Amino acid sequence: MSFPADKWKKDFPILAQIVNDEPLVYLDNAATTQKPTAVLKAIETYYCESNANVHRGVHTLAERATTQYEAAREKVQHFIHAAESAEVLFTRGTTTSLNWVAKSYGEANLQPGDEILVSVMEHHSNLIPWQQLAKKTQAVLSYVELTEEGLLDLDSLRGQLSEKTKIVALAHVSNVLGVVNPIQEIARLVHATEAVLVVDGAQAVPHMPVDVQELEVDFYAFSGHKMVGPTGIGVLYGKRHLLEKMEPVEFGGEMIEFVYEQESTWKELPWKFEAGTPNIAGAIGLGAAVDYLSTVGLVAIQDYEHELMAYLWPKLMEVPGLTIYGPLDTAKRSGIVTFNLDGIHPHDVATAMDMQGVAIRAGNHCAQPLMRKLAADSTARASFYFYNTTADVDQFVEALLATKEFFTHGLN
Ligand code: PMP
């Protein structure tokens, strides 16, 4: 493989450590990614040299902080190819972004009997806001089917779309099945009706080039911490004509133009949505993350993760008693592998793997309806990123084999 994962890994100080007497192999990237020195430094430099509140002061530090905060917005705009930076709203993360759409767009546009379409592969963040919206507006929440393989069934989507459908909310990449949904094709189907398409891009933006205009999405949500940026910052992209008609979700300082005793008016986009002092350091850190990922290259990251999966797959197939969830064809998936080892509880698998330096996750991955569909209470999940090397893959498979052996035959 020509991709220099070893070189990139050296940019992440946290990865150069020994955990339980073994080199750390961090495979919980779908939960959160590690941060390179460039991002850590950007945050430190901001606090050491420019810390001030944004948009309000005329002093030098306030101007510096404002310039850097707005520059970060422009970086994100170019990264996702939004038409303008006013369409990029800073939020706390994917969860907040999706809640904002449900609250602001949803409550204003749904009537009793209207339909919201989601799928059973959604993360709870892309389910519960729609459940709540359906309850509040007496709309109906319906589910697009999955195929046997775990892909979104486009025939089911076609069959369910109707003049009643007002919102379709789907993941770009599933955080459990690892499948990549054909968003552009979906957008065209959705836009043949009056509905808007809301996409949960939490597991996509870090791993592949995303062009929101080419994808033709109406809203697109993602989190900084899953793309080598800090926690507490994320993005809601929305098309201007939709955002303009939407009411802010939160009210207070920063987002107002004029305030009278009984009435107030809002600033223009994007600031009307950003009430209160924003996460300035977080946005600047996210800007640095975007710069860093752009240097590595999103096409290169996507290709490398496919190569890594192709390297892993034959080895995985030799692990006895392994069930993999989602498609077995690596071409149809990203770097997320959800699995169970026969007869061993996934929490035990994750604990045994941790004892061998390998960090994986076990649980329901915030996707309880999907777990029920898979007839699994809980599963183990290894999720890879561009700084994971083939040596990491080898250590992961060896640890898996040793875990299986230990629980089957005990210590020799
Ligand atoms: N959607 C998906 C597909 C996710 O994987 C996650 C994070 N696990 C989220 C939404 C929620 O992201 P956050 O917790 O950063 O808001």
Image: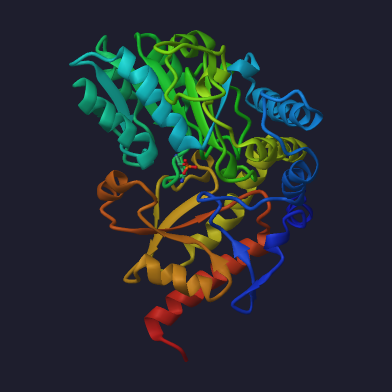
Percent x, y of residue 294: 73, 35
Percent x, y of residue 241: 50, 8
**In the figure, 346 relative to 308: above or below?**
below
Q: Residue sitting at 76 percent across and 57 percent down?
A: 6
Q: Which of the two residues, 349 or 243, is positioned nearer the viewer here? A: 243
**In the figure, 199 relative to 207: above or below?**
above
Percent x, y of residue 162: 26, 13
Q: Which of the two residues, 230 or 382, is positioned nearer the viewer here? A: 230
Q: Residue sitting at 58 percent across and 32 percent down?
A: 277
**In the figure, 380 relative to 150: above or below?**
below
- Along the horizontal axis of the image, is 292 left or right of 131? right
Q: Which of the two residues, 89 or 76, is positioned nearer the viewer here? A: 89
Q: Which of the two residues, 290 or 185, is positioned nearer the viewer here? A: 290
- Quarter residue 247 falls in: top left
- Quarter residue 207 falls in: top right
Asked if one can make out residue 70 in the rendered structure from this viewpoint, the answer is: yes
- Along the horizontal axis of the image, is 149 left or right of 284? left
Q: Residue sitting at 67 percent across and 23 percent down?
A: 55
Percent x, y of residue 389: 68, 58
Asked if one can make out residue 150 in the rendered structure from this viewpoint, the answer is: no
